[in-house]
Structures are given as structure tokens and as C-alpha cells.
Image (cartoon, rainbow, N blue to C red):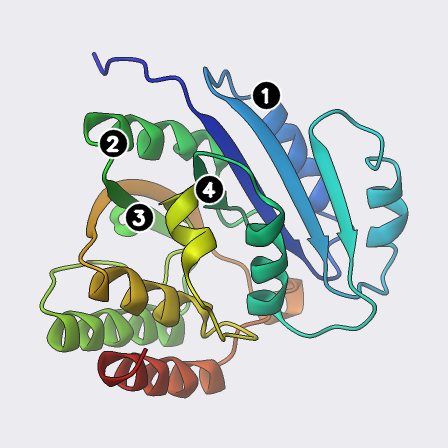
């Protein structure tokens, strides 16, 4: 039994054209029996599909912060805005689609309570993953391998969305990522600061580009470049 530690959790949700899933993912968060107090920071990245109409209904909801960007500029930019707004002792990222299940928060939170000096990643490859295309499977494996070789670690899933950061740490990092290169950049900078990254198994159910998936093979090259760049510069 993991000892309960009182903490405040910030949940950052970057959103772009997710009108069909944003309410579902929020309902999943609401249904959790979290011991922690939490805030939800929703950052809309210039949605044009009606997502904003849904978000407007959340503007006055307790512990909800809705931020609208005038133009679409990428997930990384949205996350930087969310981190700056956050006040939590710990911060987690939640994609607005249904690929990741918020019930896995409990696994990450339990792990961090064992040692409050770590960052916790949810590993899809240690858990139950399905509907991941071959391209994304091998791309994720390659990027994780490059991370391990460059930074001397043994991660299984660097590209995972579920990353649980100490709030002070993530708010202190100077992040440059605009799009999906956020994942390698933040991992590189955490490791270079000497933090231990622990992994726990999570579930994952992939979606296709026709269903709204936005990352492409081109982002893989940007990720590799980021891993190499941040190995040698700050």
C-alpha cells in the first residue's frame, strides 16, 4: 500500500480540433477517484471544428482554466502556455483524444509517492497497447533507442504522452519546442539535470490519421535532431 502524500496536480490538455473527444476525455478525468486536489488547464490551439463552443461551457467551471490561442502553432507551444499557468506540485500532460486512459494517472501518482524526487513516464510498451501502426511502433522504438544511447538510460517509451513532472521542474525548464519535438526536448533536459525517470506500464489505443491523429513520420526526423542537439547544448 503506497502511503498517501498530499499534493496538488495540474492536468495540461493541449487541444486542436477535438470536438468529438474532448468531452469524453474530460468525463474520464472527472470519474477518477483522485485523492489529490487538481486543476485542469485546457489550451486550445486555434481549433476551427467547433471545439471552442464546447470549451466555452467550461470557462466558469471550478478549477478549470481555458486558454484560447489565436492561431494554430503546435502542441509544444500549447504545453509551454499550460506549464506557465500551472500551480501544481506535479504536472501531467493529457492529450485530448482517446488514445490514453486517465485511469492510468493512479499508477503514475503511486510511483511518484514512493520517491518524490523522480519524474514518472507511462510506458505503452510495458503495458497493453493496441492499434499502433507499424510505422509508429518502429518510429517510437527507434527514438527511444536513440535516447538511451545518447543519454545512457534504459527507457522503453520516450515518446509517451503520459509524463508526470514535479511542477517546479517543468516550470523551470527553458523549452523551445513548437510541435511534437516537445517529447525529446523535455526528456533530454530532464536527464541532463540529473533527474531519474521511472516508468510504469499504461494502456494505449491508437488512432489513425483519418480519425484525427496529427503526428507524422516527418516529426520523427525532427525528434532525432532534437535528441542530438540537446545532448550537446542547453
Mark found first going from the N terminus, 4 or 1: 1
User: Local crowd at mark 3 within 10 Å, few (<14), some, or many (≥20)?
Assistant: many
Mark found first going from the N terminus, 2 or 4: 4
User: Which residue is at 65% across, 64% downward?
Assistant: 212
Disc marking residue 31: 1
User: Which residue is at 20% across, 11% downward?
Assistant: 1
Q: Are marks 1 and 2 in contact (CB under 8 Å)?
A: no
Q: Which residue is mark 3?
A: 121
- Nearer the observer, disc 1 or disc 3? 3
| Disc 3, SS | strand
| Disc 4, SS | strand
Gap between marks 4 and 1 measured at Cα: 19 Å
Left or right of 161, for residue 144? left
| Disc 2, SS | helix
Q: Are marks 2 and 4 in contact (CB under 8 Å)?
A: no
Gap between marks 2 and 3 measured at Cα: 10 Å
Gap between marks 1 and 2 measured at Cα: 21 Å
- Nearer the observer, disc 2 or disc 4? 4
Is 61 situated above or below 128? above
Which quadrant of the view contains residue 152?
bottom left
* Residue 116 on image: x %, y %: 25, 33
Q: Which residue is mark 4?
A: 91
Q: Are marks 4 and 1 in contact (CB under 8 Å)?
A: no
Q: Which residue is mark 2?
A: 111
Amino acid at each position: 500500500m503506497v502511503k498517501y502524500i498530499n499534493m496538488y496536480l495540474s492536468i495540461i490538455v493541449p487541444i486542436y480540433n477535438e470536438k468529438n473527444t474532448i468531452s469524453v476525455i474530460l468525463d474520464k478525468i472527472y470519474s477518477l477517484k483522485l485523492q489529490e486536489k487538481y486543476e485542469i488547464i485546457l489550451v486550445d490551439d486555434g481549433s476551427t471544428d467547433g471545439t471552442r463552443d464546447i470549451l466555452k461551457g467550461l470557462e466558469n467551471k471550478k478549477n478549470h482554466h481555458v486558454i484560447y490561442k489565436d492561431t494554430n502553432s503546435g502542441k509544444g507551444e500549447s504545453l509551454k502556455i499550460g506549464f506557465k499557468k500551472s500551480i501544481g506540485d506535479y504536472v501531467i500532460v493529457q492529450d485530448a483524444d482517446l488514445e490514453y486512459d486517465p485511469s492510468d494517472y493512479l499508477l503514475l501518482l503511486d510511483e511518484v509517492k514512493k520517491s518524490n524526487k523522480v519524474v514518472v513516464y507511462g510506458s505503452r510498451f510495458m503495458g497493453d497497447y493496441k492499434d499502433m501502426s507499424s510505422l509508429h511502433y518502429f518510429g517510437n522504438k527507434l527514438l527511444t533507442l536513440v535516447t538511451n544511447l545518447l543519454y545512457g538510460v534504459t527507457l522503453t517509451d520516450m515518446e509517451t504522452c503520459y509524463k508526470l513532472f514535479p511542477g517546479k521542474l517543468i516550470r523551470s525548464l527553458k523549452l523551445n519546442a513548437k510541435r511534437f519535438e516537445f517529447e525529446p526536448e523535455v526528456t533530454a533536459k530532464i536527464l541532463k539535470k540529473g533527474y531519474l525517470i521511472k516508468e510504469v506500464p499504461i494502456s494505449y489505443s491508437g488512432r489513425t490519421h483519418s480519425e484525427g491523429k496529427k503526428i507524422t513520420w516527418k516529426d520523427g526526423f525532427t525528434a532525432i535532431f532534437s535528441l542530438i542537439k540537446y545532448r550537446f547544448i542547453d
